[in-house]
Every structure is written in C-alpha cells, then in structure tokens.
Amino acid sequence: MLSYPFMQNAYMAGTLIAIISGIMGVFVIARNMSFLTHTLSEIGFAGAAFGIFMGWQPLNGMLLFTTISSIGVGELGAKSSRRENSITAISALAIGLGILFLSLADSNASYATGILFGSVIGISRANVVQMMILSISVLVVVVVIYRYLKFDSFDPIGAQVKGLWTRTLSVIFLVLLAFSVSVAAQIVGSLLIFILLTLPAAAAKYFAHTVGMMISVAVVFSLIGVWLGLYLSYVTNWPVSFFIAVIEVLFYFSALVYQRIRA
C-alpha cells in the first residue's frame, strides 16, 4: 500500500491533519465553537470552488475564503445575541457561492465530490509541502500563545478580569482555525472537516483531566481515525471520509459509555 506515491502523500498529509485537528479541537470545544467550525467548512467549500474557477489550487481558495470569513464572523458575532444568526447567514451564502463557482468552472462531478468529501488520490507532494508549511505555522503560533489561549478558553471570565487581550486572542484563534479547516479539508472534505475538529476533542475530555492530556488524547484519536480510515479506504475503495466519520463517532460514544460506567 505504502509503495504507491499517492498513499505516501495521503498518510503524510493525514498525519499533519490529525495533529492539527487534535490540538485545535480541544480549544474549539472549550470555546463552544463547534457550529462555527461547521460554517468554516462550508466557507472552505466556496473557497475551493472559487479557486477552481480562477485556475488556482483549491487549497489557496480555501485559505483566502476561510481566513477572511473567520475574521468577519468574529466581528459580526461579537454579541452573543446575534452570533448564531450571523453564522447561519454566512453559511448559507457560502454554500450558494460554492455551487455557483463550480457551475461557472464547468468542473466534473468527481472533482466536486473530491472537494466536498475529500480525495486520497488528489493529494500531490506539492500539496503535502504546502500543508506542512501551514501546519508548522499553526503549531508555532499555538505554542507562542498557548498559555493565554488556554486561560481565555477554559476561564474566559477570569481572563477578562485579569485584563487579558481577549479580543485580539479571539481573532488570532479564528485565523488559526481557518488555516486548520483548509488543511484538514484535503483529506476529509470541506463538508465533513468539523468531524475531526470536534469529535476527537469531545471524546478526549471524558478520558483526561488536564488540558495537556486532553490534547494528547485528542491527537491520538485523530491519528487512529485518519490512519485507519485511509487504510480501509484503500482496501475497500470507499470514501475515506466515511471511515473517519464512523471511527470518530465510535470513539465519542465509547467515551460516553466510559463516563456512564465511572459515574
């Protein structure tokens, strides 16, 4: 299996994706941003379709759209009373734009399916290099702001009382999340990326009691889901996103059962 270059690329990319998703997912769950992650995945679809329409790499279009939109969502949703409505409006617009750009680009159905649900074969070595650069960039920034991000995510009231730069921190996190969505969509697809950015971390919180342990467990769950999903996809020729979704859902329900047994 690993003798094929496309599978080598898929596993290298998948490993990067799992690590980034596991780390960012813990903060996504802590900051109650699961719905926003789902919206960014739909915006990523629109960005990828726009990239195809312009003759770019789909990842470049995703980065453009998700980065701009993440900042826009943060500004529009500054007040909790209008956050959900703002996100819903942007999500609806993104889906419509994605369909329009794909139609104008005259892309075939298989290409569109790859954007929506991921494609193992479509990942080139150049894509892997680009994803590696983005992943390292995200990791470096997370390491630099980790202490403040952890404080603001798990104790937002205390962070405000201490006078922490919460607004700036929120914008930085949203941009990092946009990068993570764009990177991870290469394997799972734009419409299912929220799976890796929410379920492993949601399951991890039942097995760990510190932020560091949560991140470690979430990364392990993500890695198992991606690696096993890629293998099963290769063996069966079924979509890799299907297997990743099933595996991560099983992890989550196993965590619920474990929590109930402990209680």
Image (tube, rainbow, N blue to C red):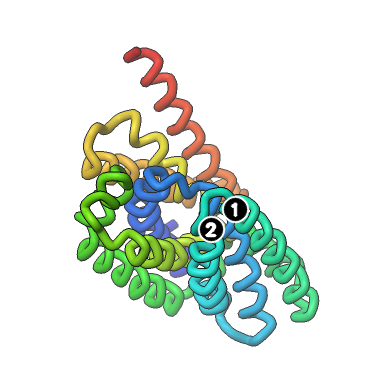
Instruction: Give the image location of residue 25, x and y in percent.
Output: 39, 49
Identity, as a three-letter code, of the amino acid under mark 2? Gly
Identity, as a three-letter code, of the amino acid under mark 1? Arg
Identify which residue is drawn at 52% across, 54% down.
Answer: 79
Per the image, label 2 sits on a secondary structure element best described as loop
Task: Left or right? Give the position of 154 relative to 58.
Answer: left
Res 228 seen here? no
Res 132 seen here? yes
Badges 2 and 1: C-beta atoms under 8 Å apart? yes
Instruction: Give the image location of residue 61, x and y in percent.
Output: 57, 77
Task: Left or right? Give the position of 203 relative to 146.
Answer: right
User: 10 Å neighbourhood of mark 2: few (<14), some, or many (≥20)?
Assistant: some
Residue 77's disc is 2
Instruction: Identify which residue, 103 or 114, lies in the foreground.
Output: 103
Instruction: Identify which residue, 157 or 207, lies in the foreground.
Output: 157
- Residue that numbered label 1 is attached to: 82
Identify which residue is drawn at 61% across, 73% down.
Answer: 47
Instruction: Give the image location of residue 158, x and y in percent.
Output: 26, 45
